[in-house]
Image (cartoon, grey):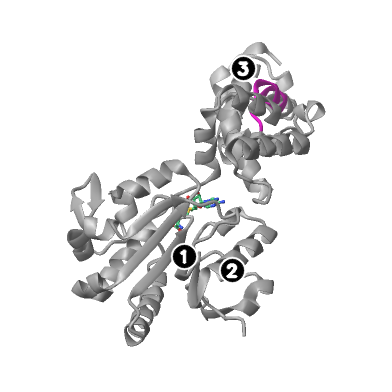
Amino acid sequence: MSEKLRNIIEDIAQDYLQSALTLRYDICTCAVCKNDMLAYILSHVPAKYVTTQEGAMHTIIQQTRVEHQAQIARAILQAIELVGNNPRHQIKEDKNKTFALLLDKIREDRSLDFRHYHQDLLRRRVAVRIRTLKLATYADYLRYLINHPEEYDKLFEVLCINVSEFFRDPEVWVAVKRVLEEMIRAKKKENSHSLKIWSAGCASGEEAHTIAIILRELLGPGMSDFQIQIHATDVDKKVMDAAGKGVYGKESLKNVDKKLLEKYFAGKDGSWTVSAEIHNLITVAYLDLTSTELIENADIVFCRNVFIYFDRNLQEQILMKFYQSLKPEGYLVMGKSESMIRDVKSIFQEIDFDSRLYKKIPSP
Ligand SMILES: C[S@@+](CC[C@H](N)C(=O)[O-])C[C@H]1O[C@@H](n2cnc3c(N)ncnc32)[C@H](O)[C@@H]1O
C-alpha cells in the first residue's frame, strides 16, 4: 500500500476509533493498545486498496470514506473486542490481583471499603482516571496514588457519582407527602412532637432539603411546635460541603415549583440559596453505610440511588441496618430503579412499589 494511501486510511480509522472509544471508556487506550487496534483495523481494510495505484487521490478519499466506512467501522468493533478486551498488558498484569490491591490501598488510606461494590462498575470508573492520567494499568494507577494522595479527591469523584436534584422523581414525593401527613397526624394524636429523618447517601443535600420543604408546607407556622431533625449523611466530603452550604444551581432546581422557589430560595438565575428556616433543619455528617454506624430511632429513612453501587450481600446488610435504625412504625424509601431484596421482604411491607415505599414490620 502506498504511504499516502495508508495515511488516508489510517486517518479515517483513527477518527472512527476515537469516537468508538469514547463509548467504551473501560478499554485501555495507551499507545500500545491504540497501535494494536490500528494495526488490526488496517489489516482488515479492503484488499483492493493494497493494490490501488496512487493517482486520483480525491476519488480514493471519497470512495474510502463512503464505500468502506461500514467495513472500517466493523473492523474497529472487532479490534476493540479483540485487542481492547485482551490488551497486551494482561500478560504483564493480573488485573484481578492489582485491582484488589488498589481496593486494599483505598481501604487502608481512607477507611472506605469498596470490596462489596459492583466490581464492573468500579473498574469502569477507575478506568476513567487511568485514561485521563494517560496510564495503562491498575498497577500504574496504584503507584500514582501512592505518590499523589491528592488523586483520591478525583478518584472519589468518579467512584461516587453524586448527581442529585430537588424533588427527584416527582411522583415519589406525592406518595412521601401522604405518608408524612399521616405520620404528623398520628404524632399530634399521641402528643409526640418530634420527627427524625435520615437521608442516607445524601450527595449535595437536595433530597434532605426537599424533605424539609415538604414538612414546612405540611406543618405551616405550626412547624415550631415540632422538633424536626433531618440527618443528611454521605462519604464524599466534597458533596457534603455543598450540602452544608445549601446553595444550588438551576439544573438541580428544575423540578421545584415556582411558588416554592420564591418562598424558600433567594437568588437568581445562577445560584439559589435555601432559606435558613429550611436549611437549619438539616445536619450534614459523614456516615459510611458499609460501617456499623447508623442514625437511631428514625421515623423515615431515605436511601435512594445509592444501592446501585453495592453487591447483594452488602445491600442486604444495609437494609438490616435501616431496619435497626427505624422506629417500629418507620418507613423506608428506596430509589426508583432499586428493589427490595427477596430475603429482606419479610421485614419490610411494600406500601407503594412505584415509589419504592416500604414500612417496617416490627418484630413480634
Ligand atoms: C447518586 S447519589 C444519590 C443522592 C440522593 N440520594 C438522590 O437520590 O438524589 C449517591 C450517593 O451515595 C453516596 N455513597 C456511595 N457509597 C456510600 C457509602 N458507603 N456510604 C454512604 N454514602 C455512599 C455517594 O457519595 C453519592 O453521594
Residue topped by disc 2: 339
| Dot 2 crowding, Cα within 10 Å, few <14, some 14–19, many 20+ | few
Asked which quadrant contains residue 76, the reply is top right
SS for callout 1: strand
Magenta stretch? 28-37
The main secondary structure of the magenta stretch is helix
User: Is 143 one of the magenta-colored residues?
Assistant: no
Residue topped by disc 1: 302
- Front residue of 200/32: it is 200
SS for callout 2: loop
- Residue 262: percent from the left, percent from the top? 17, 60
Q: Are marks 1 and 2 in contact (CB under 8 Å)?
A: no
Q: Amino acid at mark 1?
A: Phe
Could you tell whether 148 is left or right of 72 in the image? left
> Which of the two labelled residues, at mark 1 and mark 3, occupies the earlier sequence position?
3
Outermost residue on the front side: it is: 191
- Looking at the rendered image, the disc whose residue lies closer to the viewer, 2 or 3, is 2
Residue topped by disc 3: 7
Q: Amino acid at mark 3?
A: Asn
Mark 1 close to ligand 1, CB under 8 Å: yes
- Residue 4: percent from the left, percent from the top? 62, 13
SS for callout 3: helix
Q: Amino acid at mark 2?
A: Ser
